Amino acid sequence: MKPLVKKVLLGVGGVLALSAAGLGAFVWSQTSAYASSMEKIYDVPLPGLVASKDPASIQRGEHLAKSVAACATADCHGKDLAGGNALEMGPLGTIVGPNVTSAGLGAAYSDGELARLIQHGIKKDGRSVVFMPAHEINWLPDEDVVAILSYVRSLPGVDKPNGAMKVGLLGKVLDRRDSIVLDVARRIDHSRLDKAPPAAPTVEYGKHIAKLCMGCHGTGFGGGPIPGAPSHIPTPTNITPHESGIKAWTYEDFSTLLDRGLKKDGQPLDPFMPLEALSNMDETERKALWAFLTSLPPREFGTR
């Protein structure tokens, strides 16, 4: 081998080694930070909320659990709240909603502990919950949280083991980079929860419901690939009033999408879209969400 070629190869090898070492150090720092944050004990007092046996409260809780809170769905805690489907997210990890009936984790939690979990994303042991979108539903008024508690407590216990939850290295790194939310409690201002106004078909109420859309469509609602998601996860669409989004849509088009899972062009939604919960939204919730989405500034597709 000629000396010059040998020097070049040695130089390239050195750069690659340094790059690999640098990448390894970066991953280690991010995963270490993730682990440290997940071990943090949050000093947040238990809310003084107690489940009710009032039929109206239980009925309201059932509606919320099956719609905007989306906990009683197949991909969350399951329709019977005994555990949901395992969501295989490739290198991000595997997410499974646990059994929260009285024969599962529901038996281990007091009403106050369940309320804190919903509002603050904090488990019984004071640590952060993984992936549960408390940061997207803690805007619910206290009476709605009580309603959800009441519904959960009204259901029979189901003896079903919890699935295995796993967070991959990429998931931990992307969480620390704020590309996805796995470490939930650190995303919440525990000193002040932003509560929604009374339910009404308004932009303000819709702004709170729309928090449920941010995990997929982005904080700017412009859609685009979810960072780090495997190839089988569909690319979320633009839901702002831009030409590449919903500019040409009517409320009737939007309602058809929620009811039948059909886009304006008649094409079916990808099953990844949480249509099970969205289809259960009532007219007030639908009109509020539509009012908010159509009030947004237009953004080009991909500007999450």
Image: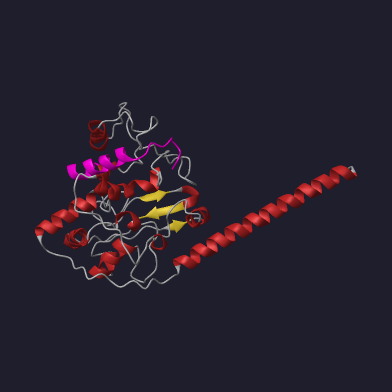
Name of the residue lying farthest toward the right = 3
* Image-quadrant location for residue 110: bottom left
In the current view of this chain or complex, which residue is farthest to the left? Answer: 55
From the viewer's perspective, is 167 left or right of 157?
right
Taking the spot 19% from the left edge, 68% from the top edge, the residue there is 50
Front residue of this view, candidates 285 and 162:
285
In which quadrant will I find the C terminus?
A: top left
For residue 179, side relative to residue 78 (left or right): right
Q: Image quadrant for the N terminus?
A: top right
* Residue lying furthest top: 265
**Residue 134 placement: quadrant:** bottom left
From what the image shows, is residue 42 above or below residue 225? below
Please tell me how many numbered marks the rendered image carries. Answer: 0
Q: Up-down: is 268 above or below 227?
A: above
Location of residue 219 in the rendering, given as x and y in whole percent from the top left corner: 40, 47
Residue 45 in view of the camera: yes
Magenta stretch contains residue 9: no
Identify the magenta region.
279-304
Image point (52%, 53%), residue name: 170
State the image coordinates of residue 43 (x, y, percent, origin top left).
Answer: 37, 73
Is 52 drawn above or below residue 271 in the view shown?
below
* Residue at the spot 21% in from the left edge and 52% down from the top edge: 64
**Left or right: where does residue 5 sit relative to residue 44?**
right
Q: Is residue 110 visible?
A: no
Front residue of 110 and 285: 285
294 in the magenta segment:
yes
Which residue is more in the foreground, 139 or 4? 139
Instruction: Report x, y in % for residue 11.
Output: 79, 49
| Residue 115 % position (x, y) | 26, 65
Q: Give the residue drawn at x 76%, y 47%.
A: 12
Asked which quadrant contains residue 42, the reply is: bottom left
